[in-house]
Image (spheres, rainbow, N blue to C red):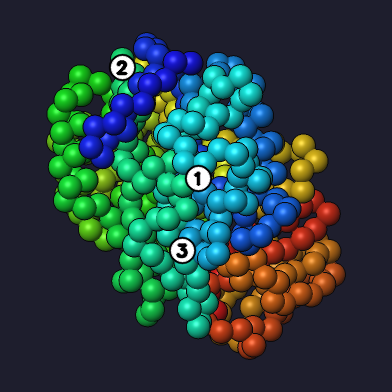
Amino acid sequence: MKKTILLFGIIFLATLASFAQFSFVHLSDMHVSTTPSANSDTNGQYFQCAIKEFASLNPKPTFVLVTGDISDIGNMQPLGMYPAITQHLFPPSLTNPAVGDYFIDSAKTIPIYYTPGNHEYWTGFDSIGLPISNDTLFYYPKYITPDTDYVIQTASAIIVCMRSGHDSPYGYPPNPEVIMGTGLTDAQCSWLRNIMKSNSNKRKIIVMHHPPVNAVGTNSDGSPYTASVIADTATNSLQNNRTNFLNICDSNQVDVILAGHEHQNVVANRKGDTVSENWPNGTRYVQTAAAFNRSYRIITVDPAFVTVSAPMRSCLGTGVNEVNNSVDISVFPNPAKNNLTVKCIKKSEIEVVNPEGKILEKSASTGMFTTVDLSALSSGIYIIKVKTAEGITVRKFIKQ
């Protein structure tokens, strides 16, 4: 595939071959490399398996697009997440890459593009286990792609890749479940308007990490989403210029917004009503669940319409030690104080893990209900892993 990179101020324009119809894969929340020195990374194995599957799809995708949270450990010193990412995913010899320098196939016919998520800004954790964020990126532009907004352009469509910001300080106590992105600057909005105006005759897709419109959807396995409380359409969304952005989408007839962050599958309209993937009456706000749970969507673009697939899952039953949420479990109460109850009908091993991947509590279960003692844990966000013969099921919970 022929690609050219043109630099115009903050704009990187990747021009692809002129396809009348083309498709691409949407991923989000890869969360590769949960510790700075990880030598073995399950989520990295998922990614390696998934890209082989994507490269063999028929029709072949024109590119793959990942909307943020490539890893868990962001800008943590001394090296951040990116040496581990290059170890697990890409050649470590590739530094200071340009947009589109990564490919998922050895023939270099299917590029993979990235936008940053909130985890890319993380520098560490505070005394109660909540993440500390930079307002700028350091390792991301060195190893992944320049920290800029850019456009992927074809004859019939534009795909606008935008930064939705680092963690907003308003997103933490008293409500740690609300993890807002700082959102868009005035300059980003002006740039976006100009891009929309100059491409008024094309299909329009915008991609970012945080969902501009939130609604309750489903987990990767299709079960109801309960990992966080979504109080309204702005929950875990954009702190700045959210309404301005929505107005730009309305006035320019944007087809689809692709996002992640919540680790759930859902499609909504501006009002937050859930709609079908191919609802025809306005901008569709699409979330795709986490890539570490094997979720993805295929987006097909032609001059008349942008088609969004139902949620799909990659590499199931391949023998990879997968975290696939295939076992039905319940975790309650959430938030929890001193005790957490895990309901699982299978014989299991239960682990409580902090966001850095450290195992804090471990127990075995042979019964239906298992009580996990949380009294020694500080307040914060944690992960519960339930390991059975069928795989590993993961849930997030909050310790009050």
- The mark that comes first in sequence, 2 or 3, is 3
Q: Position of residue 31 (x, y in %)?
A: 57, 52
Query: Would you say 384 lies left or right of 77 here?
Result: right
Q: Secondary structure at mark 2?
A: loop
Question: At x 52% / y 49%, what residue is drawn?
Answer: 70
- Residue corresponding to mark 2: 156
Question: At x 80% / y 64%, what residue is drawn?
Answer: 348
Q: Residues within 10 Å of mark 2 (few under 14, many from 20)?
A: some
- Residue corresponding to mark 3: 122
Of residues 370 and 12, the one nearer the viewer is 12
The alpha-carbon separation of the residues under discs 2 and 3 comes to 37 Å
Question: At x 71% / y 38%, what residue is drawn?
Answer: 316
- The mark that comes first in sequence, 2 or 1, is 1
Q: Position of residue 59 (x, y in %)?
A: 55, 16
Reply above or below: 238 against 60: below
Reply above or below: 252 against 218: above
Reply above or below: 35 against 375: above
Question: At x 72% / y 77%, what residue is drawn?
Answer: 361
Front disc: 2 or 1: 1
The alpha-carbon separation of the residues under discs 1 and 3 comes to 16 Å
Q: Secondary structure at mark 3?
A: strand
Q: Position of residue 168 (x, y in %)?
A: 33, 66
Query: Amino acid type of disc 3?
Result: Trp
Q: Residues within 10 Å of mark 1 (few under 14, many from 20)?
A: many
Query: Amino acid type of disc 2?
Result: Ser
- Residue corresponding to mark 1: 143
Mark 2–mark 3 CB contact (< 8 Å): no
Query: Would you say 264 lies left or right of 137 here?
Result: right
Query: Amino acid type of disc 1?
Result: Tyr
Q: Quadrant of residue 165?
A: bottom left
